[in-house]
Image (cartoon, rainbow, N blue to C red):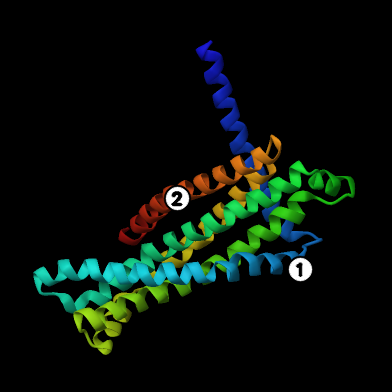
Amino acid sequence: MPDISIDRFLKRHVQSVQDFTYLLTAAIWNLFSSPRYVADTLIQMDIIGVGSLPIVLMTGFFTGGVLALQTYRTLSTFGEVAILGQVVSLSVVRELGPVLTSLMVAGRNSSGIASEIGSMLVSEQVDAMRALGTDPVRKLVTPRLYATVITLPLLTILSDFCGMLGGFFVSYYTVHLSSVEYWTYAYQALTFQDVTQGLLKPFLFAVIIALVGCYFGLSTRGGTEGVGRSTTQAVVVASVLILVVDFFVTKFLIAIHFF
């Protein structure tokens, strides 16, 4: 009996990986053939990108402020308060900006995508698309994927700037550093590798956010109760995958840099 349970468990997860891979390849391949549903992509860019802007900017600003407050306590012990701008800029651009922005967007949009597509599935709208000759992956998944891939790096750039701006306010009003001193260290600390690392991650995180939401939406079973379950699973899985992928990507980029 335990062997049967383990066998089913492994088959179910292997099937999930297979379905997710198929969804990814189909969504990417759809870019090279028509119809492309450009209008749907623009609508999703407005929903995913512009709709997430307030929470992303607020998260970035207060993250930078808290980082400056906590770092100031450590740097003051060694008498190196002047490099506070350098610490804030490196931490925000390399790691905190991309990861926190992606987690905020995942919490807002992975759940929304899963619930929207899941509701369409249980109400048989997806079956109606197929009956009319419309590919649900091309119509529902591809616009959301490319909208997220386009908007998430832009949101990350704005979040990085707000993070450094939050660190500046703390540095100026609490630590009493001059604006020239803070921004000079913040700018000079950043290298091409730092910016590349910070902007490469959002592209990968965007694929996770969009496809995880679409996958769980299209996998919804059990009516309205299943929609709620898919929504919860989408947020949890997307958040965990973002953190896991972030670790391995960071390790890989550091290895390449030192090599």
Horizontal side of residue 27 vs 257, given as left or right: right
Q: Circle 2 sits on which residue?
A: 245
Question: Pointer 2: residues within 10 angstroms few (<14), some, or many (20+)?
Answer: some
Determine whether 181 is above or below 80 in the image. Answer: below
Quarter residue 100 falls in: bottom left
Residue 140's disc is: none
Horizontal side of residue 223 vs 194, given as left or right: right
Q: Residue at x 64, y 66 (%)?
A: 47
Q: Position of residue 19 (x, y in %)?
A: 65, 39
Q: Residue at x 44, y 70 (%)?
A: 58
Determine whether 44 is above or below 27 in the image. Answer: below
Give the structural element (helix, strand or loop) at label 2. Answer: helix
Q: Nearer the viewer, residue 225 or 241?
A: 225
Which image quarter is the C terminus in? bottom left
Rounded to the nearest angstrom, the CA distance separating label 1 from label 2 is 31 Å
Looking at the rendered structure, the kind of residue marked 1 is Ala
Determine whether 255 is above or below 159 in the image. Answer: above
Residue 39's disc is: 1
Question: Pointer 1: residues within 10 angstroms few (<14), some, or many (20+)?
Answer: few
